[in-house]
Amino acid sequence: MSPKVKFEGLSRELIALRVSREIKEGSYFNLGIGIPTLVTNWTEGMDVIPQAEIGMLKTGALAQGEEVNQDLINASCQAVTELPGSCYFDIAESFGMIRGGHIDVAVMGALQVNARGDYAGWSNPARGLFVGNIGGSMDLCAGARKLFIAMEHTTRDGEYKVVKELSYPATALGKVNMLFSDLAVIEITPKGMVLKEVAPGLSAADVQSVTEPRLIISPNLKEIEL
Amino acid sequence: MDKVIPSIDEAIADIKDGAMIAIPGFFACGVPRDLLQAIIRKGTKKLTLSCGCGPLLGAAEELRMLVTNGQLKKVIDSYGLFRSASKGMADPFEQAVRNGTIEFEVFPMGTMAEKYRAGGAGIPAFYTPTGVGSVVEESNVTNIEANRKPKETRMINGQKYVLEYALKPDYAFIHAFKGDREGNLRYAKTARNFNHVMATASRVTIAEVENLVEPGELDGDDVHTPGIYVHRVVQVPRPSFAITID
């Protein structure tokens, strides 16, 4: 089903900026591939520490030129730098840290999200394969204290990604706490999806028109502040 | 106890058709590339390569050779396909997975890590919260339908967990930054990833090391993998590779 309308919203960089504002000082956080990876561009100077599931705490900025070291990458396979206090560990330790509840926030991309906090991200059925790339996504859902989704609000063809029921294979059920898209900031509560912020120039009705489940409009609805 | 083997071909000479080999690496980072090239030269068939996070996407050329030589029976991984669907369609490995000529079995990455940890630590299986609510909970996720077996689950303190089994590969191919003659290993930065747990889990662990040193030259406090887990050591030149992935 397709809402057909396409609204002009935040760039991927600005979605990442909005997500970064929601990561509290003192947090350890983990970022998935895609828009989430961009969040570290905005957390410099904040007292927060990124964990990369490859086995590193405190990943630094992306490495440039001479800084590139093939033995030093983040979980999105980008060359990164280290910082004072960076440390390394093996993969079982890394996922023990993740499943064990030591990561405050995980930020993941998604193909579909629903109002119960279920999300799908590891497999697009259009590819016609039963298998797919699960990576660390399901472990992060199982173990992170909070799960944020950062994604475009609709598909490139304007189809719903914020849906009533997942039609793609689930990554996890009932785990998503907040959704940050190019059009809105939505909190997932036991009552459903609460629309808290809209992109500049958009109304709640605009966001609803490209969102399949019925949104609860926050009494404090405001424009996304950047 | 000198475990150094003079040549890499000698170090893998006993590997027979049908062997299961653990391949570490997180995409191209920490992949035992020289050992992979040696197994390609040897031409061993019906191999099961048990991975963790896409080392064969990192070693794309080696994967292409293994597939076109018909050496692979099965690959186990958490992330083994190209992200881009169009690139995937052109990839001989993905084609073989689509045709069912190679089995591809997928587990979450943390489950892969724990399978090796458990395998090396005498734990036959473990309950994990990872995958609950997804197809991972229902059966093992493989392209070969006949091999999908239901998984056991159990409620513990009101939460559901999935039973996953330990992995004990026949061999592990390890890549270390530094190793001494007795098999004590040290990795570099994020190239450690799956190397240590795979070394502990496997019956025969073969380590390629960029820097071979005498016992004592690697400080005991700096050892990441104690030599008890490592059976053969072979020196290789420092590899050079691209680290990008699509």
Image (cartoon, rainbow, N blue to C red):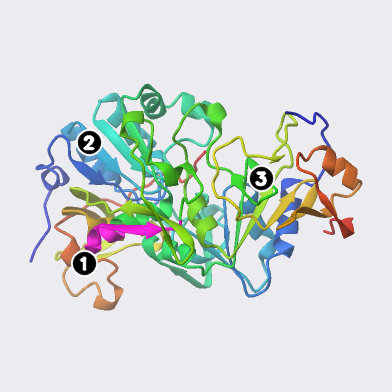
Tell me which amino acid carries mark 2: Leu
Q: Is residue A85 left or right of residue B147?
A: right
Location of mark 1 (residue): B184
Q: Is residue A104 left or right of residue B150?
A: right
Magenta highlight range: B117-129
Q: Residue at x 32, y 50 (%)?
A: B24
Tell me which amino acid carries mark 3: Val
Q: Earlier in the sequence, mark 2 or mark 1?
A: 2
Location of mark 3 (residue): A113
- Picture quarter containing residue B81? top left
Location of mark 2 (residue): B47
Label 1 is found on which chain of the structure? B
> Residue B186 or B82: which is nearer the viewer?
B82
Could you say whether the residue bearing mark 1 is in a helix, strand or loop? loop
Could you say whether the residue bearing mark 2 is in a helix, strand or loop? strand
- For the residues labelled 2 and 1, say whether their Cβ atoms are less than 8 Å apart: no
